[in-house]
Image (cartoon, rainbow, N blue to C red):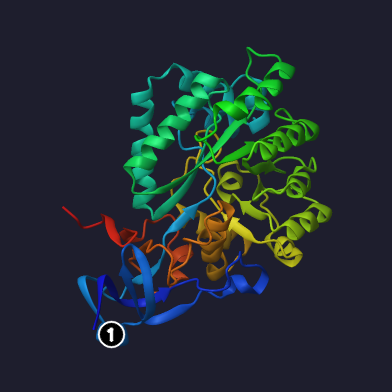
Amino acid sequence: MNQIDTLIVNASTLVTVAGPDRPRTGDEMKEIGAIDDGAVAVHNGMVVETGRTAPLQKKYEAVATIDACGSLVMPGFVDSHTHLIFAGTREHEMELRVSGATYLDILKQGGGIHSTVTATRDIAVDDLYAFAEKRMQRCVEHGTTTVEIKSGYGLNQKTEEKILNVAQRLMRKGPCDIVTTFLGAHTVPKETDRASYITWLTGEALLQFKGKAEFWDVFCEEGAFTLAEAEKILKSAKQAGYKIKIHAGQFHDLGSAGMAADIGAISADHLDFVSDEQLGAMKQQGTVAVLLPGVSFYLGAGFYPDVKRLQNSGVPIALATDFNPGSCPCYSMQMIVALACLKMKMSAAEAITAATINAAYAVNRGSILGSLEPGKQADCLILDIDNPSQIPYFFGTNLVKTVIKKGTVVWDKHAG
């Protein structure tokens, strides 16, 4: 028998999301590689083989066996768009929205991003880390095993660096893989004139955050950065060696998704409003559309990205929480999957694909995680259900029993 570290057995259904080595599009998103009575063989933190339980038990002798006891096993969620590190909360803004204020109204009144920036600048780094660590643990408990974290609540060198240093500390502590993104171009700080700030973003900042951020992002929206400004910032970042992302089409279609795709963006995020021409540019480049239905839900926008239109365009679709203090304070990718199904009419299989393998490609990690296949990290979940369609069915409930990262149990609902 072959010696391995761990054998996960007796899954009612094992969802592998195995498939081509690229983001999935169209009908491919419905193929989630489901195996009845499934098992996963793991060695050195990597998947060795997947299949049915009995044959794998005969083939492998494992140091440890994890019995799924007839529960669903699937890849860990990849949350490809979050603003996890900040100080302060903004529950008072809910009351303003209930009274009719919009997100942009609150921003113009000095709330929104600006209030969080003030709190994040003022807080000590160890306190900021403590808040972020607690949030990260909640993400893990809800099944997230890889998370992208943006800066953007500093809007100056000192605080942006503080945020990214906290992200590095979280990365070292684990258990999540963390992808870091610089979002200094979240909005223009009140104390700095616009031209000077953009000069910093396209100059000194590119050197100051080397090694601290992998991606460079811009919020291109009315009240934030114009299309021309976003293009200048992203081109400078690409030339400096950063991978790029874009906040595009959240409230208005300014053309930024297509612009960013032409530059080579890995993802364009939000896309509540986007033209067919821009979708064509995204398809040609392979730019992933990261959809954030939790924002539409929380803000009560009444509309969601048009998934069928995006699918018909051939653009790969991912899902993420957009966890942040103002427009989506949600830790749970399970809830995002439910919203994708209930509000955007995705099937459970499509939403799972979008929340795992396609989300992994949205953070440039699709070759190493996001699916349970030989040679990939053994990041997987055991959920207290027996088939994938029950994830959106039992919406608003944390169904996770066990979280496994690189073959090691990092959280168990019943431990202790």
Q: Quadrant of residue 200?
A: top right
In the displayed structure image, the side of residue 212 where residue 240 appears, left or right? right
Q: Residue 85, relative to residue 374: is it above or below? A: above
Mark 1 residue element = helix
- Image quarter where the N terminus lies is bottom left
Q: Nearer the viewer, residue 290 or 364?
A: 364
- Relative placement, left or right, of 384 versus 147 is left
Q: In this image, 277 relative to 170: left or right?
A: right
Seen as rendered, the residue at the extreme left is: 416
| Residue 281, picture quadrant | bottom right
User: Residue 52: where, in percent of width, then height?
Assistant: 35, 84
Q: Is residue 65 left or right of residue 15?
A: left
Name the residue type under label 1. Answer: Lys
- Outermost residue, right direction? 277
What residue sits right under mark 1 in the picture?
59
| 190 lies above or below 168 | above
Instruction: Answer yes or no: is residue 277 visible.
Output: yes
Residue at position x 34%, y 51% in the image: 141
Query: Looking at the picture, how far across and down is residue 398, in whole percent?
Result: 37, 56
- The reply to whether residue 221 is in sight is no
Q: Quadrant of residue 387?
A: bottom left
Residue 86, placed above or below residue 250: above
Which one is nearer the viewer's eye here, 45 or 12? 45
Disc 1 packing (10 Å; few <14; some 14–19; many ≥20): few
What is the tally of numbered marks visible in this picture?
1
